[in-house]
Amino acid sequence: MTQMNMLQAINNALDTAMAANERVLCFGEDVGIFGGVFRATSNLQQKYGKDRCFNTPLVEQGIVGFANGLAAQGSVPVAEIQFADYIFPAFDQIVNESAKFRYRSGSLFDVGG
């Protein structure tokens, strides 16, 4: 069995998911060419292109809101938030939108995949 650290395993899992399903998108702050602050997305933009692995503005609530919209339309978003402490601005989207999307749309949309 190949030994990997956690970040290598995350990168491998993202690579595997993106290779298996064209609907998987990875986005967040500095995830493109830079590969993320911890390099968890290294080489994904080079391999899958800027349409599937791309940088976003520095707005965590917008990143999660964008992921909600993509998921509701059938994509499989992987939204990266750089550091755990940065998730707090996105809590409104997670708690009040993501968690209630299916119910509020009368089961027309589901972002829980």
Image (cartoon, grey):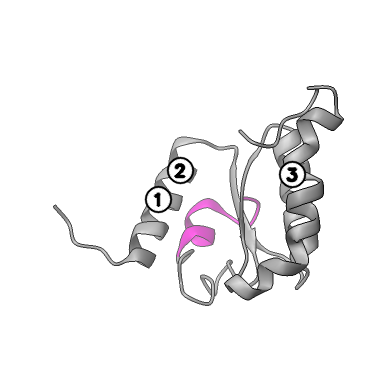
Q: Residues within 10 Å of mark 2 (few under 14, many from 20)?
A: some
Question: Label 2 near label 3: C-beta < 8 Å?
Answer: no
Label 1 to label 3: alpha-carbon separation = 23 Å
**Residue 3, above or below 103:** below
Question: Badge 2 is on which residue?
Answer: 17
Q: Residue 13 shows which numbered tag?
A: 1
Question: Which residue is rendered at x = 77% and y = 30% of the image?
Answer: 102
**Residue 104, above or below 61:** above
Closer to the eye: label 1 or 3:
3
Count of marks, rendered view: 3
Question: Which residue is rendered at x = 71% and y = 49% of the image?
Answer: 67
Looking at the image, the residue that sits furthest to the top is 107
Toward which corner of the image does residue 98 lie, by quadrant?
Answer: top right
Question: Which residue is rendered at x = 40% and y = 45% of the image?
Answer: 16
Label 1 to label 2: alpha-carbon separation = 6 Å
Tell which of 57 and 93 is nearer to you. 93
For this view, does 36 lie left or right of residue 73?
Answer: left
Q: Which amino acid type corresponds to the residue marked 1 in the rendered image?
A: Ala
Question: Label 2 near label 1: C-beta < 8 Å?
Answer: yes
Q: Which amino acid type corresponds to the residue marked 3 in the rendered image?
A: Ser
Question: Badge 3 is on which residue?
Answer: 98
Q: Position of residue 61 (x, y in %)?
A: 79, 62
Q: Position of residue 48 (x, y in %)?
A: 52, 51
**Residue 49, above or below 7:** above
The span shown in magenta is 43-53
Looking at the image, the residue that sits furthest to the left is 1
Q: Which amino acid type corresponds to the residue marked 2 in the rendered image?
A: Ala
Question: Label 3 near label 1: C-beta < 8 Å?
Answer: no
Q: Residues within 10 Å of mark 3 (few under 14, many from 20)?
A: many
Q: Secondary structure at mark 1?
A: helix
